Image: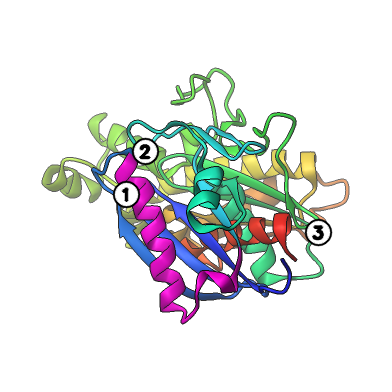
Amino acid sequence: MTERPYYLGIDLGATSVKAGVVSAEKDLKATFVVDIAGKDAKEVLEAIFTSIRRAVAKAGMTLDDIAAVGVASPGPLDLEAGVICDSPNIHGWRNVPLSKLLNEELGLPAILENDANAAALGEYHHQADPRIKVLAMYTLGTGIGGGIVIDGKALHGAQGNAAELGHIIVEPDGRQCACGQRGCAEAYASANSTAARAAQALQQGCESSLSQVLRAEGALTAKDVADHARQGDALAAKILDQSAYYLALLSVDVWHVVDPQRIVLGGGMAQAGDILLNPVRKHFQQLCWQLQGTGGIEIVLTKLGNQAEMIGAASAAALAFGR
């Protein structure tokens, strides 16, 4: 299939399907987005087909120019069979053989990849830095997704469940996590957790300019916390620093397991920028061992933003079916 140098990357999100045409060099040539909020299972499948055809047409191509399709999806997934076992976002999607359905509809080979793994693949292959052999990534949003790439390939583990980095325990017997465990990194450093801890502090009587937002909106977001921390609010700064501390603690754990040269912070919360990144770096330096320093490990913000999953899904397709 290497004579056809383009791949399709599909980001199957909670409210939209994003399709992108990606070159063999991992450059995004064209994208198309279809809203799927409130759509049923059949409508979502049609939306995926539509997004693909529109993206290909937008790139001035036909399906004959495409070598393969990769889909980034939240799990649980059966990666080997190409099946979405259960979708957290799409009602009625259980045991959907999406790779097979795409192949039948488009006449192209297709592969599934976990969305956080895909984001990590996107960051790794798009930058194509020969110095980087091992990369880890956190997608910081409702929860914390995780991906680890070693020598260009995503780490899947024996049952496809490797790199669930948000569920590494950073506080034994700590806050309840949605997964059922206690003390997960997700329960301390995700966007939702950051907002929830700020709201809890206000309810306990702490003073903050965030109280005005809570009264007006009825809820807080991680962006609210970051914005008010940037403006000098003490409580907001404290809450954000706590999230940074737990991300740094998670990074120490990840470092000792897979020895990455680069850790990437992605997802919506990464849009906070340096006000999140710099404390993570500071705490990491303080927490890590002093036997040999950090070995030059980089902790950086995503370069691809919300395009990482598309480019990574296309990268997974290229690895499986092309070049």
Q: Is residue 139 visible?
A: no
Q: Is residue 45 magenta?
A: yes
Q: Nearer the viewer, mark 1 or mark 3?
A: 1
Observer-nearest of 147 and 167: 147
The circle drawn on residue 89 is 2
Query: Please, which residue is most extreme toward the bottom here?
Result: 60
Distance from disc 1 to disc 3, alpha carbons, whole Å, reads 34 Å
What amino acid does circle 1 point to? Answer: Thr
Question: Which corner quadrant holds the C terminus?
Answer: bottom right
The residue furthest left is 216
Q: Is residue 62 above or below residue 243?
A: below
| Nearer-the-camera pick, 219 or 28 | 28
Q: Which numbered disc, 1 or 3, marks the residue that appears first in the sequence?
A: 1
Q: Earlier in the sequence, mark 2 or mark 3?
A: 2
The residue carrying mark 1 is 15
Reading the image, the residue beneath label 3 is 133
Task: Kindly identify which numbered label has been placed on residue 92.
Answer: none
- Disc 2 marks which amino acid? Asn
Determine the main secondary structure of the stretch shown in magenta. Answer: helix
Q: Is residue 150 left or right of residue 208?
A: right
In this view, the mark in front (2 or 3): 2
- Whether the residues at callouts 2 and 1 have beta carbons within 8 Å, the answer is yes
